[in-house]
Every structure is written in C-alpha cells, then in structure tokens.
Amino acid sequence: MLINFYDPKHVYIVCGKTDLRKGIDTLAIMIADNFGMDIYDDSLFLFCGNRNDRFKGLYWDGEGFILLYKRFDNGKLTWPRNSNEVKALNHQQIEWLLKGLNPLPKPKVHQASKGAFF
C-alpha cells in the first residue's frame, strides 16, 4: 500500500458529494479555501462522489501531494451526505469506513464558509 491510512496525524472525511474528476490542485484549494484547513499538516483528506464504491484521498507527504483513488470490487462505503462539513476520523472510524460501516457517530466537525459550493 502506498500510504497507510493510519499513519497520518489527521484523517478527515469531506462529507457530501465531491466531483471525483477534480485533481490535486482543485481538491487542495477546496480544503484550504472552503474549510480553512492546513493541507500540509500531515493530514489525509478523503472525498466521495456519487457512487459509494470509490473514493479519493489527498495527502501531502512532505515533498508533494499524493492523490489516492480506491474502488471497491465488492462492497460500498457508507458516506455521510450532509454537505459542507469535514469530519475528523479516528483509527476505529477509518476501519469502519473501509469496511462499509457508518464511521461517524460524533466526530469533530469543521463547517464550510458561507457561499461555498462543491
């Protein structure tokens, strides 16, 4: 595995639907501008589109960005669809997410700036 989902200091799930055609620059700008978060702070950001069998991850490894794309052959993610939020995940919640379970009972929430639409 290129990156261990448990290694970054922070793992955030971007709720709602994200256009997975977006690349590194657009996803990074979205995180920095809409949520005011530091994309260089050893953080992995996870995004999901319309289909719940795939997601993207954006991670700064200290030298450049890594863009991850994962598609499940058998199974689906349970992804929170309330938009304009980023929620922090702990190790257990990451495990649940990757098994298709609902990972978000009550994690920390970061609200998007008003007028932001993605």
Image (spheres, rainbow, N blue to C red):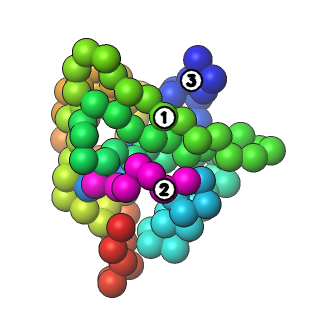
What's the residue type where badge 1 is placed? Tyr
As drawn, which residue projects farthest toward the bottom?
115
Q: Which residue is mark 2?
A: 22
Q: Secondary structure at mark 2?
A: loop
**Which comes before the other along the chain, label 3 or label 2?**
3
What's the residue type where badge 3 is placed? Asn
Rendered view: 82 above or below 63: below
Magenta residues, as a range?
17-23
Position in image of residue 85 (x %, y %):
31, 61
Residue sitting at x 52%, y 27%: 6
**Which comes before the other along the chain, label 2 or label 1?**
2
Q: Which residue is mark 1?
A: 69
Q: Do the residues under discs 2 and 1 have CB atoms within 8 angstroms?
A: no
59 displayed left or right of 77: right
Check the picture and name the quadrant holding the N terminus. top right
**Which comes before the other along the chain, label 1 or label 3?**
3
Q: Secondary structure at mark 1?
A: strand
Separation of residues labelled 3 and 2 (CA atoms): 23 Å
Is residue 108 shown to the viewer in this render? Answer: no
Q: Nearer the viewer, residue 86 or 46?
A: 46
Mark 1 crowdedness (10 Å alpha carbons): few <14, some 14-19, many ≥20: some
Quarter of the image where one finds residue 59: top right
Rendered view: 71 above or below 108: above
Check the picture and name the quadrant holding the C terminus. bottom left
Q: Which residue is mark 3?
A: 4
Q: Do the residues under discs 1 and 3 have CB atoms within 8 angstroms?
A: no
Q: Main secondary structure of the magenta part?
A: loop
Position in image of residue 49 (x %, y %):
31, 48
Position in image of residue 117 (x %, y %):
33, 74
